[in-house]
Amino acid sequence: MILKLAVRNIIGNGWRSLVNVLILSIVLIGMVWMQGLFDGWSRTARRQMQEWEFGDGHYEHKDFDKYDSFTWDKSNSKIPAELQSLIEQGKAVPILISAGVIYPQGRLTPITIKGIPHDQEILEIPTEYLRVEDQTGIILPAVIGTRMARSTHLEEGDILTMRWKDIHGAYNAYDIQITKIMDTPVPPVDDSQVWVDFTHLNEAKALQNSATHIVLKDDSDIVKNEQDFRFITIDESMQGTDALIDVKRLSGNLLFALLLFLAMIAIFDTQILAIFKRRREIGTMIALGMTKRQIVKLFTIEGCLYSVFAAVATSILGLPLFIYFGVSGYKIPQEMSNLSIAGTAEPIKCYYSPSMLLSTFILVLLITALASWMPTYRIARMKATDALLGKV
Amino acid sequence: MKKILYIILPILLFAGVAQAITAAEILAKVDENMNAKTTKSTSRMIVETRRATRTMSTVSYAKGNDIAYTEYTAPAREKGTKMLKIKDDLWLYDPSTDRVIQISGNMLKQSVMGSDLSYEDFMDEVELAKTYTATLQEDTVYDERSCYVLSLAAKTDNLAYSKRVIYVDKERLVPLYQELYAKSGKKLKTMRMSKVTKINQRWYPLQVVFKDELKSGNGTTMIVDEVSFDIKIPDHYFTKAMLRK
């Protein structure tokens, strides 16, 4: 009965209710779109990083710390037999990492050298361009990304010198030729990276079949005897990227928290006004036997119904928008694309998970319930006789 | 006839003695001249780039080749910057941020104040006789001085430069020119020494031009204005606490 009465009252409020529902609906559309965008970004980044960097998880040398380049030259070991077997079956790909320096246009530029087999097919890196055709030659084919090419002013066909220290600490230097500039959506594969052939980098570092990372095609191929390596799941690999996306998500959420706050003020105001205008009605209801608790419930449900109606309006008004951004995607602005986060190179397809939709609606419902309930403290202090006389 | 013999014999004898000096002995003499137990020097580093020429002044204190403390005294922008090297560790103090940072990893490969020297080069000072096997090549004349040419091959795998070629002044036994090579045989750096001066009992080049052969530019000139060897330097100069003083 209370619910029926609440619905009738909301409809009876006319324009005032409509405005409240519309404001709430706009906030909900924005919140769902924004959450969908960031969830979509995270999914796109994950897919791209799997395709270009981590496969279905990877083994990492126990001494390797991606945040401490001091560890890079020392963190490599001979590939364990079980992992070597996976590599030979095409189920894994080894990567050797070294710090180095190149001299584009005679400028000293510190880089990260990565050695990867030229015949691998697990990662999207165009490694076929790393094949050394002339084994007696001293020019090593190298692949770099577009961002690296832009920052160093290098073009395909350019020859330059690359210098590094071998495993014993002795300098070595080769000329390299840029055989391919790859367009990768994953900045960590591109920024300050020079990719060369795995075997040749091993030789140049005075190593033998040693690797820093071993990327798996399928995480079901985890081996028992990993020796100096430890397995890093794709979730662990994604932590840094997810954290960066969450920072962006937070700034978006702050904007919608502000809008939600304004919508709540509107509902709060409406409730205050309603209680003031409906004093006689409240008095009559009390006189007819309704408890104050039931009346508080009535007003709270009325407020909550705004968010229910707003959810309905959102699904009608927002659906075309959600479908458009879910199918065509949203192109991140150029200034954000320059951030070193995967997933920004192509339009991000918004992803609306049921849990996200439900949690967003429940959040708005709870906040609306709070904003609707707070003004009803006046009802609890009302005396039926005073209410009937309109004295409250 | 006798007269001629008197003249020729000493020349032949001297030539014989002179030829008897081995590559290892030359290298040991070079080390004697170039290395000291302790060194205090005031010097200028002139960096020539495509845009401008910058001069930086430093005061350095060193103990052998492993331990060194350097303070920049000019220009104003670099004044107060300090560097401390203890064996394989290198710390830098930046007065603008009042912070001490350890130079490691890729940072070691960066150029020092835009010069042709990297931080790594500060770490790679070695005693040549101990670490290289020398072979005498054909003599040459360099900078109007008669020189031995030594080809040095690293005795161990862990030296930064696996090969060096040095021109050593025959008379003063100081290097006048040096080429440093990578394992692949690529020439990486050259050093040209000049203004060789006798300081106490040793000959010492007061000017060195470093050139990174892979980098464009005219190189970096280091001019030593004052230098004293084997003096007493308090141990506290070689502590991290000194960086913040």
Image: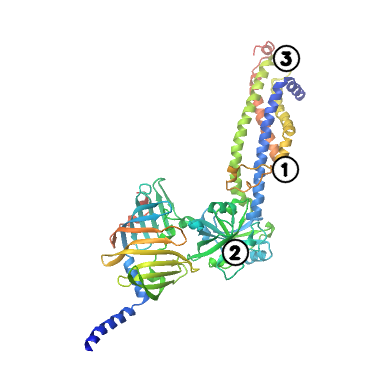
Identify the mark at residue A327; answer none if there is no mark: 1
User: Can the viewer see residue B124 in this picture?
Assistant: yes
Q: Quadrant of residue B11?
A: bottom left
Q: CA distance from mark 1 to mark 2?
A: 39 Å
Q: Which residue is mark 2?
A: A198
Identify the mark at residue A284; answer none if there is no mark: 3
Q: Which part of the image, by quadrant, shows the C terminus of chain A? A: top right
Left or right: A293 with respect to A101?
Answer: right
Residue at 44% across, 72% down = B153
Q: Quadrant of residue A127?
A: bottom right
Q: Amino acid at mark 2?
A: Phe
Element under disc 2: helix
Q: Amino acid at mark 1?
A: Val
Which is nearer the eye, A79 or A350? A350
Q: Amino acid at mark 3?
A: Thr
Image label count: 3
Residue B206 coordinates in the image, percent (x, y) = 32, 61
Element under disc 3: helix
Q: Which part of the image, by quadrant, shows the N terminus of chain A? A: top right
User: Can the viewer see residue A297 in this picture?
Assistant: no
Q: Quadrant of residue A7?
A: top right
Q: Residues within 10 Å of mark 2 (few under 14, many from 20)?
A: many
Residue A309 coordinates in the image, percent (x, y) = 73, 29
